[in-house]
Image: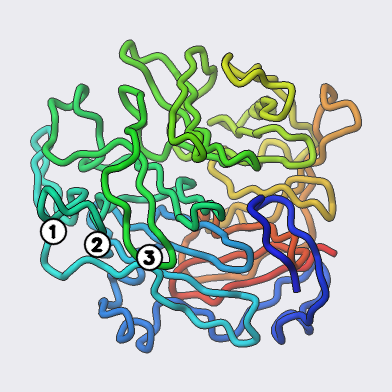
Amino acid sequence: MTQQTSNPFRVEIVSGSAPAWLVSAPLMTWHEIPNTVLNIAENRAAFGVSSPELGYVCAYSGGAWNGSKLYVQGGGHEDYTRGGTYGIDLADDVPVWFEVGPPRAAGTTDQITLHGTEYQGYYYPYDGAEDDRQNRFPVESHTYWNLWFDAPTNRLYRITTGGAGTVNYSLYGGIPGSSNGVNALDVTAGKWDGKVYPDVPMEHTGSGTCCGMDEFRRIWRTGKGAADENQLGVFDIETGTWQVFDGLTGTTFSDVAFFYDPSRQWMVRLRTGYSSSMVQTFDVGPTWDGVSMPAFTARTLSGDAASLVRSNTSIEYCADRDSYLCMRYSTTDRAVYEIKVPANPADPWPVTVLDVAPPTHTVDLVRYYKRWHYSAEYGGIFWMPHAGSNIYFMRTR
């Protein structure tokens, strides 16, 4: 149906037929894709994991997209998954989950004591002989927005964040085997590269800090410096190097959403809080000099729905509507919000609630990260609520 290029934000539409599940998908209506539940007995048997281990893959954890393929990997704390990575190709008429990277052997967890608290279920990274640099599993951790696929290297990149096994040495006295850095999984070989990438050069990156990837193969993230000052960092996949800039304003932690708008070539960041002035943008296209701290611009949301947009909402740029579609799902808030950028971006950005409330689930859901995804390929939003749910699709064109 499409031709995937090295740019994940620009997809060329070519001849071909739509998958069977898409043919009957109505416009601006949630369509449940049959038989796409991850945590079922057939998959557990195929992957050699238990129901909790497969179910916890989505615990405060997101995903990454390679064209029509969704990859998921996560866990963290006592949400014990053994670090397996799984994928599904939604271009298939009948999509089936498959193993991308195998889980670690059962029973190989470590226990540590941090600030008087014992933590279980952590994997220290890069287990095995010191000279064995292949398939060194990174520490088990929630992945939040921190998974990104890069086509030229054919790798799933994970910017490690949060968790007792991933904190930086200098702040916590040096935990053996801890990692505050970059991990990458070869999705064809199914192996992690090991410790071959530089750590994030920040004192602390916190739990739930945000990452976003632009079309220039750069992954942006927030963190803090030695004096607890807010910082912005960027990892260049092509060069394998980091840059860090001081002077970031606004909260850096607590699941702050961070995403890319390819039409304007800027990153968009939702700041923590419930006020109507909680959006920041910064240019990452040709106007950025590549060496200075990007200039952040505060934006103001307007309308009755503006105060309902949370900083930890799932949010994506939708090219079909030239807007940002975001969704928060909980027992008290189940709606899809649309944020429009006016002709003059300095004007307030109107927020409206769309008449496309997501389907009801028994699980109290809040965060989906990149399991909420706009696809230029299919013209719509994919949504994977949790590991025990089918994947949904809403056509936007």
In the rendered image, the vertical position of residue 1 relative to residue 123, given as above or below: below
Mark 2 residue type: Tyr
> SS of the residue at dot 2?
loop
Mark closer to the chain start, 3 or 1: 3
Q: CA distance from mark 2 to mark 1?
A: 9 Å
Mark closer to the chain start, 2 or 1: 2
Q: Is residue 347 left or right of residue 97?
A: right
- Dot 1 surroundings within 10 Å: few (below 14), some, or many (20 or more)? some
Q: Is residue 339 visible?
A: yes
Q: Nearer the viewer, mark 2 or mark 1?
A: 1
Labels 2 & 1 near each other (Cβ < 8 A): yes
Look at the image and name its color scheme: rainbow
In the rendered image, the vertical position of residue 213 relative to residue 231, given as above or below: below
Tell me the residue at 26%/76% (across/down): 49
Q: Nearer the viewer, residue 147 or 316?
A: 147
Q: CA distance from mark 2 to mark 3?
A: 13 Å
Tell me the residue at 11%/48% (across/down): 130
Give residue 104's position: percent from left, percent from top. 22, 66
Mark 3 residue type: Thr
When asked about the image quadrant of residue 108, the answer is: bottom left
Disc number placed over residue 109 in the picture, else none = 1
> SS of the residue at dot 3?
strand
Tell me the residue at 67%/49% (across/down): 316
Disc number placed over residue 80 in the picture, else none = 2
Q: Is residue 309 left or right of residue 370?
A: right
Q: Is residue 178 left or right of residue 261?
A: left
Q: Is residue 326 visible?
A: no
> SS of the residue at dot 1?
loop
Disc number placed over residue 85 in the picture, else none = 3
